Amino acid sequence: MASSCHIVPLDRYNWELCLDITLLPAQEAMLPPVLYSLAQARFENLTPMGILVGEKMIGFLMYGEFGGICWINRIMIDAKYQGMGFGTSAIQQLVAKLNSNIHCREIRTSYARDNYPARHFFEALGFEVIPSELADGEVVMRYEGN
C-alpha cells in the first residue's frame, strides 16, 4: 500500500521537478513527454498538477473542463514509484476536487484502444467505458463512482 501522496498545482517554483519523471519503455510509446504536456496545457486550457510524496515529485497529471465535462487528460507516475498505489490516490484526490467543482457535471478520461493497463486502472477507480464514444480514436470512459 502507498504511503501518502498529494496533488499540487504546478507553478513557477515546482514545474521543472516534473521533467525528471521517467516512464517504462512501453508507456513512453503511449504518453507524450511531460514537457509536451506542459506546452499542451498552456495552449489548450488544461491544468497541470504534480504528485508529491514528501518533497519528491513522483508524478504528473493534467485535467481540463470543457462545457461541463471535466477531462482527465494525463496521469504519469515515475517508473520507480509505480505499483505502490500513488496513481490511485492521485486520481481519487483529483476526482474529489472535480466533484466539488460546480462547473463539472461529468468526469471523463480516455485511453489508447490497446492500452489495457490504463483501462483496468480506471475501471478499478469507478470509470466505465462509454461504448459509443471515441475521442481522437481513443476509448472514452466516464466516472460512475464506486
Image: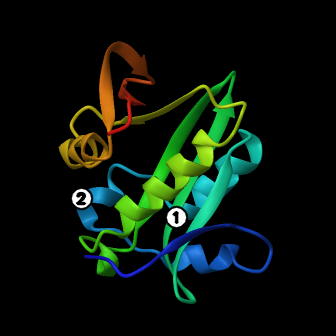
Residue identifier under label 2: 26
- Looking at the rendering, which quadrant does residue 27 occupy? bottom left
Front one among 86 and 114: 86
The crowding category of the residue bearing disc 1, from other C-alpha atoms within 10 Å (few below 14, some 14 to 19, many at least 20), is many
Q: Name the residue: 64% across, 40% down.
A: 64
Residue type, label 2: Ala
- Seen at 70% across and 67% down, the residue is 10
142 vs 42: above or below: above
Q: Secondary structure at mark 2?
A: helix
Q: Residue 35: percent from the left, percent from the top?
A: 60, 63
The location of residue 47, given as percent across then percent down, is: 68, 51
Residue drawn where x is 41% and y is 52% of the image: 31
The three-letter amino acid code for the residue at tag 1 is: Phe
Alpha-carbon neighbours of circle 2 within 10 Å: few (<14), some, or many (≥20)?
few
Q: Position of residue 21 (x, y in %)?
A: 46, 75
Question: Element type at marker 1?
Answer: strand
Which quarter of the figure has residue 16?
Answer: bottom right
The colour scheme is rainbow
Determine which residue is flagged by label 1.
60
**Is residue 79 toward the left or the right of residue 95 in the image?**
left
